Structure formats: C-alpha cells, structure tokens
Image: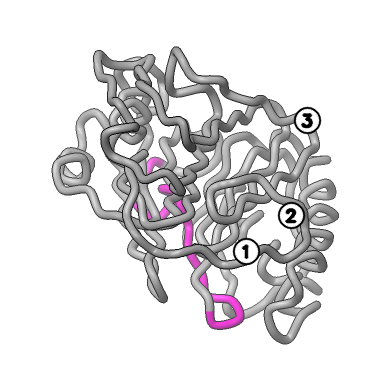
Amino acid sequence: MNSSKPAAVDFSFAGFAERGGRTGEHRDGWGVAIHTAGACQLMTDHLASVDSPLALAFRRQPVKARSVVAHIRKATQGRVALENSHPFTRRLWGQTWSFAHNGNLVGFDPPAAHAHPDYTPRGDTDSERAFCHLLSVLAQRFDQAPPRQELYAALATLAADIARHGTFNFILSNGDLLFAHCSTDLHYVVREYPFSVARLIDCDLSIDFSKHNHLDDRIAVIATAPLTSNETWIRLQAGELALFVGGEQVGAAPVRCRSRELAIC
C-alpha cells in the first residue's frame, strides 16, 4: 500500500491474510513492513498468517502509515524459518528499504564483485539474495540517494537482468517511493474520490470508504491478485516496473509533497 496520507491497512490485510493458509496455499510464513515518518517497523513470523497470533494482533490493533509492504510465503527455496520470512529490510542512503518477492529465481548467484558487506543475506532464499544484490549494486553506483528518474532507470535495468532467472514479481519501498515489478502477476487499484463500498473476495467483509476518507485522500493497493470483487483492478504488464508516490502511479519525474492526515484502505 502507498498512500497520500498515513492510512490504516486493516481492511485490505484482512482479506490478504486469509490467503495465507485458508483461501490460499501460502502457509510458510508472513510479514509486514510498516513505514512511518523516519522509521520502519518490521513484523515477521514463520507461521501461516491464518494461524499466527501476531497476525491476529496486527489486525486488531492496526497502525497507520503512508507505505506498507506485506507478504505471505509459499517456500520454493530456503527453509520455513523466521529469517526467511518476507519482507526483508536494509538501510541504504540513510533510509530503510523493505522488499517482498513472489516467484522463483533459478540459478541466481550474483557475482562476488557486486557484494557489499552491509547486504549479506541472513537466510537462504533466492528472494533475499535478489534484494541484497539490488542494494549492493545501487550502493556501489550511487554514493547518496539519486534523483528519482535515475533510481527508476537503474532498478528497471537490474530487475530485467534478475528476471532472466525466473519469476520476479516484487515490491520495494523506502516509505515514500514504492516500486512494483511485474514478472507474471501483479495488480493494483487506486482508491480516491468519489469513494465507494469495497467487498473482499476472501472473507465476508465490506467497507464504505466514503465514510472514512477525505476528498483529497488517495490510496494505491498493489497485490498479486485482486483483493476485492467490485473494484477496478489494473493488471501490470510482464516486465513492467511501476512507481507509486502519494497513492498514485507516476513516472520518474518529481511530484509535489502532500499533507499527512489519516486515511483508511
């Protein structure tokens, strides 16, 4: 999720979490990275999200943030263990970046020349290797955070290179920018005025967003498959790298900052 203002993600998370063992087969762990002003809180668990007390607690006491990255895992490489649960987080250019991957990278073994001591995998997944490789290359290429258009171009090239090894759907965020790369399946919806009622696919829950949001709220929700049955979800194209800022998909050019009130998604 990426929003123009701090937003509660409990509605979308309620449906998403059902896919972690009840309506879907992703039972090998879950996690969420919550980006707030100047900080990132990470919660991960090796349990399925439908069985996790931590997931239940998160649903009951939701926080508000401008960007949230959540993941439910179906293990293809690596043990079912806490250190292999997504999202993964690392610091780069004084910012905390979070990363979640859906897919399988075969034979992906980044060259040692690109290794960076700050970006050594702690687990044994292809996903974390890809994340560490991305940050290693970016850290070597840019001493400080580059202009957004340069970062976008670098990520697009790196993502295309890694995707040659298999399926590489991923979300990458620093709390302000949220990059979404589609290899096979990735969809998004933008919730904005005029807000309407949304109904989850995976559980009997609906919400009237017009009762919770202001006229200038804008919230983008990105997921492997649509979470609701009555909203217009847009499917990204294979190989597409989308960038979301302030709750909308944008190009690589700068956009103006928005106010920081509250919203619900």
Q: Please state the horizontal and vertical placement of residue 256, each as a whole percent of the image.
A: 62, 66
Q: Residue furthest bottom?
A: 143
Residue indicated by mark 2: 109
Q: Residues within 10 Å of mark 2 (few under 14, many from 20)?
A: few
Magenta residues span 80-94
Q: Residues within 10 Å of mark 1 (few under 14, many from 20)?
A: many
Q: Residue at x 83, y 46 (%)?
A: 160
103, above or below 181, in the image: above
Image depth: mark 2 or mark 1 in front:
1
Q: CA distance from mark 3 to mark 1?
A: 23 Å
Residue indicated by mark 3: 238
Q: Is residue 37 magenta?
A: no
Residue type at tag 1: Cys
**Dividing the image into 4 quarters, which one contains the C terminus?**
top left
User: For the residue labelled by badge 1, is the local secondary structure a helix, a strand or a loop?
Assistant: helix
- Which numbered dot is residue 17? none
Is residue 11 visible from the viewing direction of this image?
yes
